[in-house]
Amino acid sequence: MPYVNIRVTNEGVTAAQKLELIEGATDLLSRVLGKDPATTVVIIDEVETDNWGLNRESITMRRRRPKSAV
């Protein structure tokens, strides 16, 4: 039973986009590894940008900086 966990920041991912991720991950495992889609579990976690860090700062702070400073 394959288990896929996708984590994204909670910045407006739509239900349609989530469904596309679920379908795509399921299809990929089926095509590449021959896994049964009926037993493939896909979980999408949306993470607050304050709880996601990169290079010693939160994504919230990175998003506030001018684009040229990133």
Image: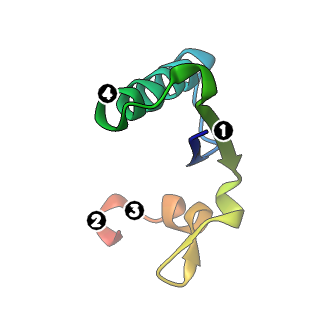
Alpha carbon separation for disc pair 1 and 2? 34 Å
Tags 3 and 2 in contact by the CB under 8 Å rule?
Answer: yes
- Of the pair 3 and 9, the residue shown nearer to us: 3
Which one is in front in this view, the residue at disc 4 or the one at disc 3? 4
- Label 3 secondary element: loop
Query: Mark 3 highlights which residue?
Result: 66
- The label shown at residue 43 is 1
Amino acid type of the residue tagged 1 in the rendering: Ile
Q: Residue furthest bottom?
A: 56
Query: Mark 4 highlights which residue?
Result: 31
Placement of 10 over or under 21, stated as above or below: below
Query: Mark 2 highlights which residue?
Result: 68
Identify the residue at horizontal 53%, vertical 61% (top origin).
64
Tags 1 and 3 in contact by the CB under 8 Å rule?
Answer: no
| Mark 1 / mark 3, whichever is N-terminal | 1
| Mark 2 / mark 4, whichever is N-terminal | 4
- Label 2 secondary element: helix
- Asked if residue 46 lies left or right of residue 54, the reply is right
Alpha carbon separation for disc pair 3 and 2? 6 Å
Residue 44 screen position, x and y as percent: 64, 39
Looking at the rendering, in which quadrant would you find the C terminus? bottom left
Alpha carbon separation for disc pair 1 and 4? 19 Å
Alpha carbon separation for disc pair 1 and 3? 33 Å
Amino acid type of the residue tagged 4 in the rendering: Arg
